[in-house]
Amino acid sequence: MSALAFSIVALMLVGPVPALLARASWPLRAPRAAIVLWQSVALAAVLSAFSAGLAIASRLFVPGPDGRPTATITSEIRVLGWPLWLLYVVVFALTLMIGARLIVAVLQVAVATRRRRARHRILVDLLDISHGSAPRTSGLRVLDVPQPLAYCLPGVRSRVVVSEGALTALSDTEVSAILTHERAHLRARHDLVLEMFTAVHAAFPRFVRSRNALDAVRLLIELLADDAAVRKAGPTPLARALVACAAGHTPKGALAAGGPSTVVRVRRLGGLPNSRALAAVAYVTAAAVLVVPTVALAVPWLTELRRLFGV
């Protein structure tokens, strides 16, 4: 029953729950809490998937004639029978495979992203045309590109990159808003949040995973950076800067000010403010998503293991 319950929870957290959460409009008014909720859903889905596999695999340790767990393959097969024993072994192997895929995905995403950013960082340092207008230690680089664009390269040696076109087309207040937006990404390390969801998305099989979580979190981290810019420069300058940079093409691995979510973000700037009540509900829900299923499902399983091993 524990294995079945864990499986149901994992499937719910991978499919219906992200689909419903992705269609909700309230995260626009509580982006930080919504990110925490998405993280809780993702973590609970992974833990539930592992728990389901381990719960099924634990059935390999069936009680022998003396009431103690069987210790040999032959005794397990004799008690369970070949079909059921093979099923449990396959499920356990799949659990290990998912764990290995998750570890590999985390490493691949981290290494590939950092290599890409390092190469681009060298490139923008070489192409910088600021000519001393901004200290090199500030991490600001200006590119001789007529199209307005702005983005940041997170990391230990982070960079904020703007084009000459953006500096020409935008007013001083709008430039301040867009720079604050990018520096908010760097200060909060939004790239690490995005990396986690990218790795989880890559680790799960294609017939199970969806882009709901990844796309939603990508939008939410932009909203958080927008909020930081609004506190510095106000909503109108930021909205104008976002529209000006909306069509800018930025490298993969960078966090850009513009992009396909610009329309949603500009509309949000003229809408209702963030809600503390919605944020509080989201935080409580995030805690419940992690704690309640874990306690409700893990306790019976741990009780069974305690009985099985006589501890």
Image (spheres, helix red, strand yellow):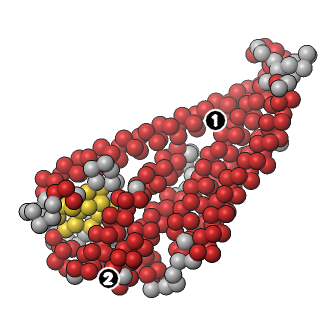
Q: Residue at x 27, y 50 (%)?
A: 157
Residue 237: which numbered mark, if any?
2
Of residue 35 and residue 138, the one placed in the foreground of this image is 138
Residue 74, located in which quarter of the rendered image? top right
Q: CA distance from mark 2 to mark 1?
A: 50 Å
* Horizontal side of residue 48 vs 69, given as left or right: left
Above/below status of 42 relative to 263: above
Measured along the vertical axis of the image, is residue 44 above or below residue 165? Answer: above
> To which residue does mark 1 refer?
95
Image coords of residue 205 (percent x, y) = 56, 45
Asked if residue 148 lies left or right of residue 80, the reply is: left
Q: Earlier in the sequence, mark 2 or mark 1?
A: 1
* Residue 266, placed above or below residue 59: below
Residue 42 appears in the rendering: yes
Is residue 24 at all visible to an observer of this figure?
A: no
Q: How many marks?
A: 2
- State which mark lies toward you, 2 or 1: 2
Name the spot of residue 5 as percent of width and height, x first: 78, 47
Asked if residue 182 is positioned above or below residue 47 in the image, the reply reads below
Amino acid type, residue under disc 2 in the picture:
Pro
Secondary element at image label 1 = helix
Local crowd size for mark 2, using a 10 Å CA cut-off: few (<14), some (14–19), many (≥20)? many
Tell me where residue 25 sits by quadrant: bottom right
Q: Position of residue 116 (x, y in %)?
A: 29, 47
Q: Residue at x 73, y 30 (%)?
A: 57
Looking at the rendered image, the quarter that the N terminus falls into is top right
Residue 70 found in image quarter: top right
Classify the position of the C terminus by image quarter: top right
Is 173 on the left or on the right of 90, as rendered?
left
Give the amino acid at mark 1: Thr
Residue located at (52% from left, 48% from top): 200
